[in-house]
Every structure is written in structure tokens, then in C-alpha cells.
Amino acid sequence: MGLEAGRQFGPRLEATVASLHHEHHLGYERVVQVCEEIFGVTLSKGGAVSIVERAGKAAGEEAETIGEQVRQSKVIGSDETSARVHGRNWREWVFQATRQPPGRGPHPRWRD
């Protein structure tokens, strides 16, 4: 089992990097630091960004499928929270339909 062209890390490390950034809300500098200190892996900030971007593209089709199921549901629950992303305030809405796990959608709020 090899890596695709342009990839230097395996799928488990890439999943960990994406999780640290999105689920644990670590900035890229902290992700790089955690990889070095805990896993002994040297990763550049640009490398971490590329990993997270690839993960986002890979998840896009599934996210669209979940979104369509939520839109077609008769009952939809929702919640809103906020986060600071690259110095800007963003709102994140979470939606849940009767037969679908929660789906998330970040939306920028264009004032700080």
C-alpha cells in the first residue's frame, strides 16, 4: 500500500491532523507542534493546511448527501454557535433531521 503522488503522510496521520484542526479547534501552528511533540513527525504549517484541504474535498460529496437528506426531512432541529476563524467571526449552524446524524455548515458573519 503506497501513497498517492504529492502525499507524504499516511491516511491515519492525515485524519489525525484534520481532527486536531476541526474537532479540537487547534490552529495550524499548534497542530504542527502536537505532531512533533507527540508523534515525532515533522510537518510544516503548509503541509497541515494541504492535509486539511484534502480532507475537506474528500468529505464534500458526503456532506452534500447529508444536506439533501436534511432538506427533505419533515422535521429539522437546529442550533447555532460562533467561532473566530482567521480573525473573523463565523457562525456555525448544526442541523439534524429525524433519520440523519447532525450535519454542520459554517457561515461567515462579515463583521468582526
Image (cartoon, grey):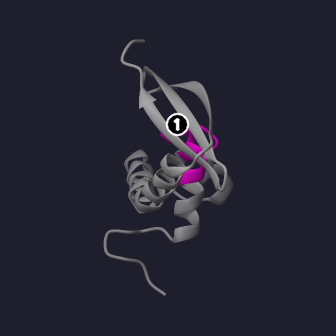
Q: In this picture, is 93 found above or below 33? A: above
Amino acid carrying label 1: it is: Gly
The segment highlighted magenta reads: 18-31
Residue 26 drawn in magenta? yes
In screen coordinates, is 63 left or right of 75?
left
- Could you tell me which residue is drawn at 61 percent across and 59 percent down? 40
Q: For the residue carrying disc 1, how many other residues have a C-alpha within 10 Å: few (<14), some (14-19), or many (20+)?
A: some
Q: In this picture, is 70 found above or below 16? A: above
- Could you tell me which residue is drawn at 41 percent across and 56 percent down? 60
Please tell me which residue lies in front, 108 or 47.
108
- Could you tell me which residue is drawn at 36 percent across and 77 percent down? 4
In screen coordinates, is 18 left or right of 49?
right
Return the x and y of residue 56 as percentages of the image width and height. 43, 54
Quadrant showing the C terminus = top left
Return the x and y of residue 94 as percentages of the image width and height. 58, 38
Return the x and y of residue 8 as percentages of the image width and height. 42, 68
Residue 35 drawn in magenta? no
Name the outermost residue toward the top.
112
Magenta region, mostly helix, strand or loop? helix
- Label 1 sits on residue: 27
